[in-house]
Image: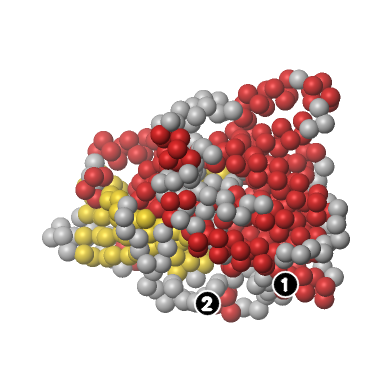
Amino acid sequence: MRMNGIVAGNSDITPAVSVLDLFTIGIGPSSSHTVGPMRAARLFVDQMERESVLPQTAQVEIHLFGSLALTGKGHGTDKAVLLGLEGETPETVEVESVPARLERIQTQKQLRLKGGHPVPFEAGAQLLFHRTENLPRHPNGLRFIARNAHKQVLLQKDYSSIGGGFVIEEGVATQTPIAMAELPFPCRNGEELLRHAAESGLSTSEMALRNESVWRTDNETRHRLACVWEAMRNCVQRGCRTAGTLPGGLKVQRRAPRLFRELTEQPEINLRDPLAILDWVSLWAMAVNEENAAGGRVVTAPTNGAAGILPAVLHYVVMIRGANEDQIARFLLTAGTIGILYKRNASISGAEVGCQGEVGVACSMAAGALTEILGGTVAQVENAAEIAMEHNLGLTCDPVGGLVQVPCIERNAMGAIKAINAARLACAGDGSHLVSLDKVIATMRQTGQDMSSKYKETARGGLAVNVAEC
């Protein structure tokens, strides 16, 4: 069952995924390490309430495994699970209230489960990091245990945060009626996407919109896509005007506000520089990811670590190419369709396949979406998505200090530029190419499987080690 990024069960049936599932609005800095754990914690406390064990609960234990344990502190996992247990969700939590809430929990040494029921809480004793252990299903594992006053277990649940804010609850029989529904254009892979296009004469976004009609009316889908765009715009605007130092020990300074001032205060220089538009695209991407690094509200696209790429390219479409509301919707529908192919056939989790599954997938999504807006065919859309991923293969996830800052912020700027280049290359051709999107997705998955765990969001290799040694 899929609901706001929560997928219950462990069946081999793959639930149908809506485009809007990939574009959920939450808080930074990580969809897999912040958004997913908060949802899992909220899911657990909801289950406590349903099973009537909440009033008897005297203590809650939180166990974090694998990548969540290794980089959880830098990614805010510890804070997210506390907020989730207090009843918050990534979509609705008031970002400005978070520091005071966490200070109150620490000072009073007390959690208010579901916003009301108080239980004592000592982080060192009840929030445990299992850095050398993994749960069986996924590197991002969580376990919650509720105990009564006699230390007896009232409820225990395991969850996996599988990327993009999606959460799987372990050990529950899957009920996925929507997975069995017949979509008008079921696209399990790129080959099916191309076949449907050839048979129907529809664009990628037109097929996606008809698939979305399984869940809601076209008007509601367009409205919700407009809300996604509005959230992206707001995030860019906040990032462009908010200066200061990002949280964490790296003392990284926000650069977007200064770059914004330089670009807006010296327009005559921009007119003489044919590449100045690249500075704007980089600005839009970095503004988002600096907001994300600060724990601000962002749109998973398809993850938080890669949240700047699609907004940056979409700003390019709107601000430079003058896109209208219909084109904005088409962009997001096309991007979501490509993202679903990666989620279904590979992964969008940095802990599973490295940053090729985050920045690489976002770059691929943006490239395909831009190609449609530029007038490309479905074959050219597929080609652009393939080009973008082909040149992100092997990209590691090695955050310095376990923070979503270095190299993540600049990496989003580079991914946005690469997406635009991939779209232009695809539009210069006729859509025919040697390596298919399906083949590059399979290659990405295989590369992720072969990649050492130290390069998959553990901060145990790559830049995370070498910068720390300098």
Image x and y of residue 125, in percent: 21, 48
- Say the numbered circle drawn on residue 13: 2
**Farthest residue toward the left?**
150
Q: Is residue 219 left or right of residue 29?
A: right
Marks 1 and 2 sit apart, C-alpha to C-alpha, by: 20 Å
Residue 262 drawn above or below residue 138: above
Would you identify the image quadrant in which residue 434 lies? Answer: bottom right
User: What residue is at 23 percent from the left and 45 percent from the top?
Assistant: 124
Amino acid type assigned to the residue bearing label 2 in the image = Ile
The mark that comes first in sequence, 1 or 2, is: 2
Secondary structure, mark 2, is loop
Q: Are marks 1 and 2 in contact (CB under 8 Å)?
A: no
Residue 124 drawn above or below residue 166: above
Residue 208 drawn above or below residue 224: below
Front residue of 149 and 65: 65
Front residue of 162 and 123: 162
Q: In this view, does 439 lie to the left or right of 176?
A: right
Image x and y of residue 202, in percent: 82, 68
Amino acid type assigned to the residue bearing label 1 in the image = Glu
Secondary structure, mark 1, is helix
Q: In this view, does 228 lie to the left or right of 176?
A: right
Image x and y of residue 66, in percent: 37, 55
User: What residue is at 37 percent from the left and 35 percent from the top?
Assistant: 100
- Front: mark 1 or 2: 1
**Badge 1 is on which residue?**
191
User: What residue is at 77 percent from the left and 70 percent from the top?
Assistant: 194
